[in-house]
Image (tube, helix red, strand yellow):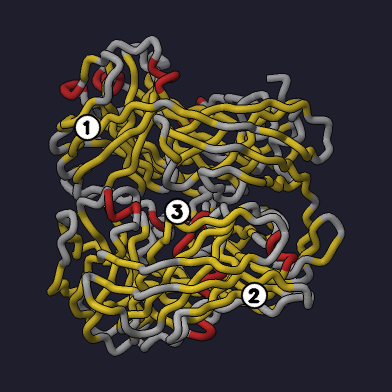
Amino acid sequence: MRKKAWFFKNRTALGILGVTLVFGILATGCPTGSEPETTTNITLSGTIGTITVNGAPASGEIWIIARSQNGNWLESTQKSESGAWSIAIPSTDLESTTSISFQVRINISGSWLNHDIPDVTKPYTGQSISGIALGDVTIAAVTLSGTIGTITVNGAPPSGNIWIQAYNQDGGNYLGETSVNSQGGAWSIAISSTNSNLASATSISFQVQINTGGSWLYHDIPDVTKPYTAGQSISGIELGDVTIAAITLSGTIGTVTVNGAPYSGNMWIDAYNQNGSYLGGYNTSYSGNGAWSIVIPSTNTNLASTTSISFKVLITNGYNLRQDISDVTKAYTGQSISGIELGDVTIAAITLSGTIGTITVNGAPASGSIWIQAYNQDGNFLGNSENVDSGGGAWSIAIPSTNTNLASTTSISFQVRINYLSQKTATKTYSGQSISGIELGNVALAAVTLSGTIGSITVNDAPPSGDIWISAYNQDGNRLGETLVNSQGGAWSIVIPSTNLESTTSISFRLGINTDGSYLNHDIPAATKPYTGQSISGIELGNVALAAVTLSGTIGTVTVNGTPYSGNMWINAYNQDGNYLGGHNTSYSGSGAWSIAIPSTNTNLASTTSIKFRLEITDGFHLQPDIPAATKPYTAGQSISGIELGDVAVTTES
């Protein structure tokens, strides 16, 4: 499932589980703000009526939370007995805010129930707002409940905060959470019916999260997935004992500066393997320098193939910048690593900023995660904004100058992305400077939906690890859209802009599996549907049982014109006739293991007698050198391991 990947690539889009909110909870049991740097506050005040959950008066801690139009948490206050409330927010925290919405958060025996109040949104013009009547709040909720056994990490009870979190089947979208302790016991999670991820849920899976001093450890409980019927609570969920083996990466970081100014605020230190696959992260309210540690469970599927580990810094206060620490890479041999010195981190960045109007899909306000993304003239990704609201407002994208795609950029185009639905908007000329005042206007998307179910998914009789996608293609083989699923199957849907379908007469489907950089694709021809301009439901993709062969080995140092190369790279396999078989994608940083999975249904594999290899180097170049010395004979149906590609020296003249 994709929940970890989604979480760490889009932390600012979390909403309910935003980083700032989480750390408020850790400190006090409910969200609180950081100390303001100025005495100038904006005050929001008003009243709230009675609050009921499933018809009964709400009990326990009740908080009122204010959020910006981007869904970002601003401040909160605890509900008083009289119903009167007020929230003070430093004016500096509201500089990009154009509207403010409200949420009620209730602590029910350690489970936080979040409920949006959609009918009360206030425009913000730089002044305090009084007389905000939130009215009576009637919440319909479902409850997930059961027991969990003891929780240990490397044989000992973990210190720090422990949560059980629930996710739906659609790529692991967050539903709710509750706190537990290492001794285990009964637990329950209450989820409001306004949670948009619950509306599309057909099954629910669970994860244990442990935060020890800023180090986050995530452990899936794969054997416990429950089918979900809309509106029905589920009890008696037994999660069992949770026994985690883990390794720890630890060290220090020095001073972080952005465009010459010292940075302080929320920051992540993230670890990746040689293939660019995420391993784990450490979160801190950074204020100068300090120690850090990252705990990674041995069940992390990316860890199994890891031979080296590199690091990135992500800063989120006022930016959304991810910076490689290119001179710190550590060899990994299955053991914890201490004493990792990340040193000082100097970030230079350009900023793209402006406003956007209302965002609608088929005439209704867009729902879900909404971002503005920037691409250069070659279609290379540059960066994305924080989550924006369907009502529009201010946005900004910060791009580090070390972004290799920025060096060749002459123009920048923008698109609005709603979950997996996107539409292009404006294009601006780029001359190496920040650009402000970019007006994207109103965005009105028309879309059709493809939906249905898929059964269980296996590769060589076992559930595959990694991300699993269903993609839709038109009769010419052009990709239309995609969605995430898991190996247990279930309901799925793909939303496609109508403009992408103008020449489409039929739609076919393909299953794609990405396991640590190895991409396995499987066509499902029996599910092809005629397209007549309307949404299509009830598409049954059935069970998918794949047989596959695997090519695997290592690659040494890659140099381009005598200089060591680091960046995006593909290792591709072809048969003796030059027909493509499959590929492995990696964020290459020196050397490492690779593997390519090829389904037996690949028509090129049937006639294959030998396999040859080619690199594809894409950062700053587009080079495709052959590696003739690595050609291997192929026997039908047999995997090949231990393929040594060796060092590869490329010159642009070749």
Within 10 Å of disc 1 (Cα), the crowding (few <14, some 14-19, many 20+) is: some
The kind of residue tagged 3 is Ala
Residue for badge 2: 88
Give the image quarter of residue 447.
top left
- Secondary structure of the residue carrying tag 2 is strand
Q: Is residue 57 visible?
A: yes
- Secondary structure of the residue carrying tag 3 is helix
Residue 419's mark?
none
Within 10 Å of disc 3 (Cα), the crowding (few <14, some 14-19, many 20+) is: some
Question: For the point 21% across and 54% down, which residue is it?
Answer: 203
Q: Whole-percent x and y of residue 481?
A: 38, 29
Name the mark nearer the viewer: 2 or 1.
2
Image quadrant occupied by the C terminus: top right
Vertical side of 202 occupied by 431: above or below: above
Residue for badge 1: 637
Question: For the point 45% across and 80% down, which residue is it?
Answer: 83
Residue 5's mark?
3
Vertical side of 339 occupied by 141: above or below: above
Question: For the point 54% across and 31% down, which residue is it?
Answer: 443
Within 10 Å of disc 2 (Cα), the crowding (few <14, some 14-19, many 20+) is: some
